[in-house]
Image (cartoon, rainbow, N blue to C red):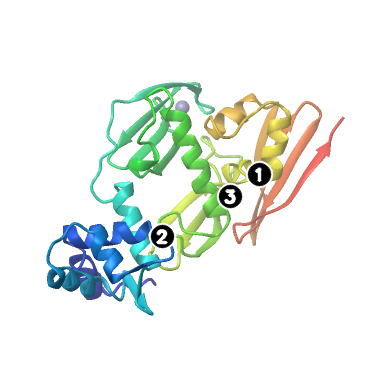
Amino acid sequence: MPTVDRQSAVSTFSSLANETRLTILDVLADAPVGLSFSQLYEAVPIDDTGNFNYHLTQLTGSFVQKHDGVYKITPTGTAILGALVAGTFDADLSIEPIPTNWECLQCGGDFTVRCVDTRAHLRCDTCESGSTISVPPSAVDSTSKENLPTTLIQWYRSRIQQLRAGFCHRCSSQTDRRLVEGVDPEADAPTPSVVRFDCRRCGASATVSGATLVTFHPVVEGFFREYGLETHNQHPTQVWRALDSSEVRTTSENPLEVEVQFSMDEETVSAVITAAGCVEDVRRVDTS
Ligand SMILES: [Zn+2]
Ligand SMILES: [Zn+2]
């Protein structure tokens, strides 16, 4: 289980609650080789050396390191500053819903993009199938309304790639993953297979369907691209919709294993998702 020392987390944040200290971090973030005390003092608008020294001392340790008279920002300082710049803590993404021309694979309904707080919902209006992702406002800052669905897909793809590589979507720590659900072909309303990712450090979890995970595998993306289907500007369901066929089936119950197959013209690309949630045995087969 992740453990957070709440007392130290509180004192960490309270030691940042000051304009001068944030400015010091900001200045150091732009100085990769670090700055001497006088260079730093010069760059921060404050007139009292004693006062300045006090604030700098409060940052030294977690956020700033001093070595041979040179001050540098620490990785923690960079991460905190990055989160503040990204607007993770105080911004709100909420906008009017944006219609798209994506058609629901399940029911033929229309997909709409809805952003509420810092989450984007890319879902069917009728049956609500689709995806929900966390988005820092900085990721979509300068994007026009008509380009927003595409930008969100690019962000979504980058998150899936990060999870695929084994890192937490929230704090970049390592994750544990496993295939938690296969598919039941007998079910009235078939549900997708589910791979679950749990962060070892911050406790965040994410679930991704097996078909989505396979879709963003480089070999599979290459297959799609050869048939003119792009994965970086439309929801994965739109790629599947354009295929001759797509199929996900449970090939083993114990250990749980799922196979994903995408076919176009006379070629099939397939992959196995193991109980450990890994995409393996990716192959392209000529079926002519
Ligand atoms: Zn639908
Ligand atoms: Zn995490």
| Horizontal arrangement in the rendering, residue 111 relative to residue 81 (left or right) | right
| Horizontal arrangement in the rendering, residue 40 relative to residue 130 (left or right) | left
Reading the chain from its start, which is encountered first: label 1 or label 2? 2
Task: Tell whether circle 1 marks a residue whose Cβ is less than 8 angstroms from ligand 1.
Answer: no
Task: Using the image as rendered, state which of residue 205 and residue 54 is in the foreground.
Answer: 54
Q: Which residue is mark 2?
A: 171
Reading the chain from its start, which is encountered first: label 3 or label 1? 3
Q: Which mark is residue 123?
A: none
Task: Tell whether circle 3 marks a residue whose Cβ is less than 8 angstroms from ligand 1.
Answer: no
Residue 180 at x, y = what percent?
A: 53, 56
Task: Tell whether circle 2 marks a residue whose Cβ is less than 8 angstroms from ligand 2.
Answer: yes
Image: 144 above or below 130:
above
Image quadrant holding the C terminus, namely top right
Q: Residue at x 50, y 21 (%)?
A: 108
Residue 95 at x, y = what percent?
A: 28, 29
Amino acid type at circle 1 is Arg
Q: Which residue is mark 3?
A: 182
Q: Which residue is mark 1?
A: 249
| Horizontal arrangement in the rendering, residue 77 relative to residue 198 (left or right) | left
Q: Examine the image and state in which quarter residue 284 appears.
A: top right
Residue 184 at x, y = what percent?
A: 58, 44
Image: 200 above or below 194:
below
Give the farthest residue toward the bottom: 68
